Image (cartoon, coloured by chain):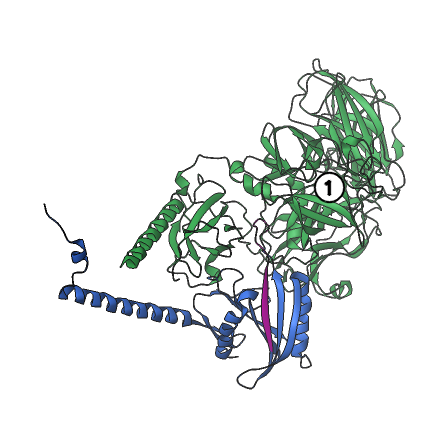
Amino acid sequence: MSRLLHCYALLILSICMFIFTESRLLHVHAQTTVLTPFEQNLDRIKRATVLVYLAQETRDDLQIICVGSGTLVSRRGLILTNAHHTVPNDACNGNTIIIALSLSTEQAPIPLYRAEVAQANEGLDLAVLQITQSNDGRTVDLDTLSLPFVELGDSNLVELDDTVSVMGYINLSADSVQLRRGTITSFTAEPSGGEKTWFKTSAAIPALMAGGGVYNQDGELIGIPTTAPLSRQTSSQTCLVLQDTNQDGTINERDTCIPIGGFINALRPSSFAQPLVRAATLQTTVEVVSRSTAVSLSQFGFLSPFATRFFFSTAINEANMPTNVITSAPTGTRSLYLFFDHANMQPNTVYELRVNTDNIPNTALSLAPVRWSGANNGLWYIGTSNQVLPNGVYDFTLLADNIVLGSTTIVIGGGAQFVPSFSDIVFGLADESGNPLGNGFVLPVGTIANARFIYRNMQDGLEWTARWFFEGVEIFRSPPDVWRDGADGSKTISIQDANGLLPGKYRLELYIAGRLSATSDFTLAGLADGAFPKVFSEPTFIGGENQIEALSSSPTTNYPNTVENLFAQFDWNKIGTNTRWRLEWYIDEELFFSQNLSWVNADNGTQFLTRLARSGGLLDGRYRIDLYIDEIRLATNQASVGIGQLPIDRFADPEGLALRGRILDASSQQGLEGVSFILISDQFSVADFVWNTSQIYDVAVTDRNGYFELVRPLELSNDDVSFPYSVLIRSDGYLPIEFDGFVVKADTPNPLELTIYLTKGNE
Amino acid sequence: MQVTDLRHNAFTDPTPGQRWGHILVGVLGVIALLTVLNLKNATLSRKTIYTNVEVGITALYPADWLLDEPTSSADYVFRVQNRHERGYPTTFQIASIPISGDSQARSILDLLTLQRSKTLAAYRTLLVEPYQFAEDQQGIRGLFTYVDTAENPFTQAIPSVVSGVDIVVSVGGRALVITFISEASNYDNNYTLFETFLEDLSF
């Protein structure tokens, strides 16, 4: 009888436990304070932050060469980081990439995986790595990999004074993931990315955080802290000694050190990384089949970088050309661009801009050492906009590979000076009134090219000159003339050649009394189609296993998703050798490939080929190709593959609540190992569950201490939409726990930690 | 003063009503025990039918095992796992591999060994031998073992040793690979379930 009473007591205890547990689960959202989205996702962000080693592995040794931080951007093991410490180069010449994760947010990272470079842009100093192996050399099945990751935000929405949080490692294996907070203090403009090519922050960022993540208040990754070490074995501040590389039994300054760069004040916006991440996700490669050369590959790589013709402008136009040339600027100036011609720059050239205002370093305008993202030669600018520049004398010094390339000075202050000036040059074929027609900067090849410019505060009788250049060589200089057109207005001038102007790159410089007042580059290419150039024919799409098969195929715009190769072909007219052009590929209106190229083919030709390839078949989607010269889109077309839309990845959203906890034996209070925690999708209740994986939201299995955690974040319910999950825990020898209506909300602690007790029974 | 004889009270013979009550409790207890045992056996032997017309298989698997029918790219067409047991979930799995006329079942096993060795720790083939189905259909059986490691690096799961069996049989222009995987410590107990599964399997 007493045993029966014991049984009844245990049963009642179990029911009480169950009700207690369930009530805890059901009311978790009512216990907490409201956090910002970043704070809510901080645990996931920390977990997604990794330490990246580049090592040189030989048969019996592994030597760490370079190190930096990185961030997981997909559950299948894609890592966004810097290229300078992952893509082998002179400073970091390794052959093995090792990924270390902090298994607890308070612990130092532990090497767990090996990775390969999936996508990289050395000039932008960005790389996307793909985890391929566990650290013991086993191949990782990417379909089963489910790592915490973060989402890339829209860096174009970042504004001055926005609060940002920088995540990364600051110490080699001694510290856990660290957080540095700051605000956006300024933007730096360059031709490669416009006004927001770089973010500057007030956060003090140690060099080892390079490659980590910068987050907005919504917990989205909006930038990558970026700096480039100059070379190995520089000063102790930028180089760490980690191993006994010379095998002398001691670790000291005679060992090879690991370059980590200096302090970081430049953040590369995530918009630069989006195409790389997208391309790595798609696992699609783009190949320019016909002859062409990436502009970043210098034909004179052995020559040192140099820069010349430094000047300032207060504005740029749509073709990235200066609208004016100034020698001083008035009080209240809000934008300033330093222009210069450069040559022999390489993607791994490390350049730096040092700016002093009244002999005091100006961190807002200075740019710490970073890699070169432009062509090897041409016109470049570094500038800032939308912020008032204090009065003072500004000294600009440009360095490349720690060597001064040039310096210049400008004074900001005083009132507006009404000096004679030219500005706003545009090019085209002039109509009867002398107004240039066309797109402004790419003109059809002919016998004439017109330029119109604005003039202000001119005085009749002033001496002025126009100098025309072709591919860097002066081809025509108007004799010093006397101004006769009055004070303000616009004027059109032209260059003509009865034998025809050659296709290629041209430049116009306008001088007033021997002072450069305006300058701009333009390109002559293509046949005349009215005032517009017809450089490229409309691209068409053809299939085929290889180039030969493709060229004999008929073009169409719909392809099944079983095709592994898709070629885009186009014809071209009158493109001069070394003319810069750009090729871009989009899928569903999202850019995933962009490359600046230098034209090396004949001036005219047909069937220029570029190929998309993906093993196993191209993904469904709408693929578009765009062709550019001087930022002007000259041709475009698109084709559909499969249903013409990318398949939806239900795991693509990292947002939500992380659920983890511990399952214990109710009587012994010991953690239970190997118990499955099954979270049923919100569309099904426990009663509807028929033990089919398609009904499951996620499953976790407890570890040796009874701890479990779901990999997939739970969706948060709100007043408009509810996600009532169901929970099922069954383990042989224990009474089951099953209940519906498990709801989490924005105010639920994130991560949510549960303690669940299982009572022994006959189940 | 009143004296109460406790010993006398303690050993007082039960009344007829109490006697019937004890008998009734005993009978009810036996009935309950039999019912529970019956329910347990019924539950344990309860099965769910699975049919795949495309591949041409029909199977009976233990009820409440988790069914996975992958929609794409997976290397199996059917998989069930016992998610009630602790440790590595006992798994029955069927894969369909197209083969040419000259392909040998043995070569399929070798291919599996090569593929699994790349992804599974300490993978070893222990034995390869002929296997005969009840309908006199010939196949080949391979025993293997490996160390299973948790996919989630953030938990402290201890790797467990698992053992398994692949049975490869040629059916028309394809080979069926019927796989059983279990925690090594529970292998013998679970293998009887697999034998039952094989008896019920038609292809």
Q: State the image coordinates of residue B173 (x, y, percent, origin top left).
A: 62, 79
Residue A341 visible at all: yes
Q: Is residue A608 above or below residue A42?
A: below
Tally of numbered discs: 1
Helix, strand or loop at label 1? It is: strand
Q: State the image coordinates of residue A578 (x, y, percent, origin top left).
A: 83, 45
| Amino acid tagged 1 | Val
Residue visible at 21% across and 65% down in the picture: B22
Q: Residues within 10 Å of mark 1 (few under 14, many from 20)?
A: many
Q: State the image coordinates of residue A714 (x, y, percent, origin top left).
A: 48, 48
Q: Is residue A278 above or below residue A378?
A: below
Q: Farthest residue toward the top?
A: A414
- Residue B78 or residue A58, whichever sits in front: A58
Q: Does the magenta segment cover residue A470?
A: no
Give me the chain letter of mark 1: A
The quadrant in which residue A28 appears is: top left
- Residue A571 or residue B95, whichever sits in front: B95
From the rendered image, report the letter of the chain displayed in green.
Answer: A
Q: State the image coordinates of residue A534 (x, y, percent, origin top left).
A: 74, 48
Instruction: State which region is magenta.
Output: B153-168
From the rendered image, report the letter of the chain displayed in blue.
Answer: B
Q: Is residue A149 left or right of residue A692?
A: right
- Residue A749 or residue B42, whichever sits in front: B42
Residue at numbered disc 1? A67
Which image quarter holds the C terminus of chain A? bottom left
Q: Is residue A71 left or right of residue A658?
A: right
Q: Does the magenta segment cover residue B161?
A: yes
Q: Is residue A189 left or right of residue A674?
A: right
